[in-house]
Image: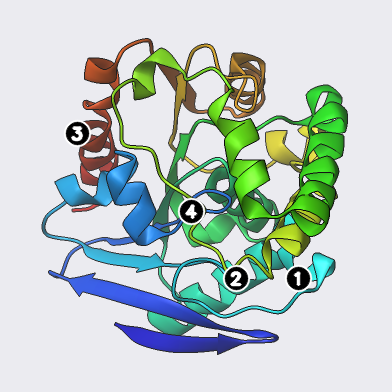
């Protein structure tokens, strides 16, 4: 593991170098590399013969951050990603994979520099466009709740939320974020959205797989379905059970193998 410095943060980075095609793996909001492992979202565990770059986003996991809302907007996280790719895979096409905020970061980076990506495996895309307005207010309310009543009250409220059937039986986890940074993370997410549909339609990445699950208002099927219609080479697979979720690492391995030779 090593540290990579970006404006306002030091990112904790891990490169598993087995030769082969470069892959970059991201995680979701309030998560990290280690937490995604517990949540069965570490799809890179099924890879071999690649150069797999994993990192904790600014303010998450072992990476540092500052209590500045703008630092956690998705466009700024895409800046961090592109800097990492310049450092670790200069001049190469990379396969990108990540859930939720990771998907959003990848899409913002791919709109900016589509030639950097040989393919994308996008997991549980978040609310976007019409559905983002209400979610943004939820995030701002969460920030206020943490500031006014503390982390435990926020966590207790979260325990009342329904669990998607694909995640049934997974362990309960807490945000892998310093509580002093959580309000800024939530406000940054609340001020963010996916790129415009027109911008996404123009990406032109040659191969995209979208993996979604059912019954999760924070990651609605409507976003995944819209992305499939917008992206010219996209396919969609939907998980309804935990067994479906456990097939996802093999999906990523097959995606990488298509252009990894």
Compared to residue 240, the image places residue 109 above or below, namely below
| Sequence-wise first label, 3 or 4 | 4
What residue appears at the point 19 percent right and 61 percent down from the top-left corner?
Answer: 50
Residue 210: percent from the left, percent from the top?
47, 28
Q: Position of residue 60 (x, y in %)?
A: 53, 66
Residue at 59%, 42% in the rendered image? 155
Residue 215 appears in the rendering: yes
The mark found on residue 28 in the picture is: none
Q: Earlier in the sequence, mark 3 or mark 1?
A: 1
**Marks 3 and 4, Cα distance to the nearest angstrom?**
22 Å
Number of numbered labels in the structure image: 4
Asked if marks 2 and 4 touch (Cβ < 8 Å), the reply is no
From the image, tell me which residue sits under label 4. 31
Quadrant of the rendered image containing residue 69: bottom right
Circle nearer the N terminus (2, 1): 2
User: Closer to the observer: label 3 or label 2?
Assistant: 2
* Residue identifier under label 1: 71
Label 4 to label 1: alpha-carbon separation: 16 Å
Q: Which residue is mark 2?
A: 59
């Amino acid at each position: 593991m090593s540290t990579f410095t970006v404006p306002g943060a030091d990112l904790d980075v891990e490169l598993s170098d087995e030769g082969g095609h470069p892959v970059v793996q991201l995680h979701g909001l309030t998560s990290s590399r280690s937490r995604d492992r517990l949540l069965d979202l570490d799809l890179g565990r099924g890879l071999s013969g690649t150069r797999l770059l994993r990192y904790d986003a600014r303010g998450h996991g072992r990476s540092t951050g500052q209590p500045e809302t703008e630092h956690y907007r998705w466009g700024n996280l895409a800046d961090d990603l592109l800097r990492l790719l310049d450092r670790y895979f200069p001049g190469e096409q990379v396969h990108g994979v990540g859930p939720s905020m990771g998907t959003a970061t990848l899409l913002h980076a791919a709109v900016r520099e589509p030639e950097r990506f040989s393919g994308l495996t996008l997991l549980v895309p978040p609310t976007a466009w019409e559905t983002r307005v209400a979610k943004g207010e939820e995030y701002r309310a969460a920030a206020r709740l943490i500031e006014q009543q503390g982390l435990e009250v926020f966590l207790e409220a979260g325990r009342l939320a329904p669990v998607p059937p694909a995640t049934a039986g997974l362990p309960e986890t807490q945000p892998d974020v310093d509580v002093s940074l959580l309000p800024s993370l939530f406000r940054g997410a609340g001020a963010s959205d996916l790129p415009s549909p027109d911008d996404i339609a123009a990406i032109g990445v040659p191969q995209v797989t979208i993996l979604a699950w059912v019954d999760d208002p924070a990651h609605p099927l409507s976003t995944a379905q819209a992305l499939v219609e917008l992206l010219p080479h996209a396919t969609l697979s939907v998980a309804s059970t935990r067994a479906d979720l456990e097939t996802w690492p093999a999906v990523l391995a097959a995606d990488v193998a298509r252009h990894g030779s």
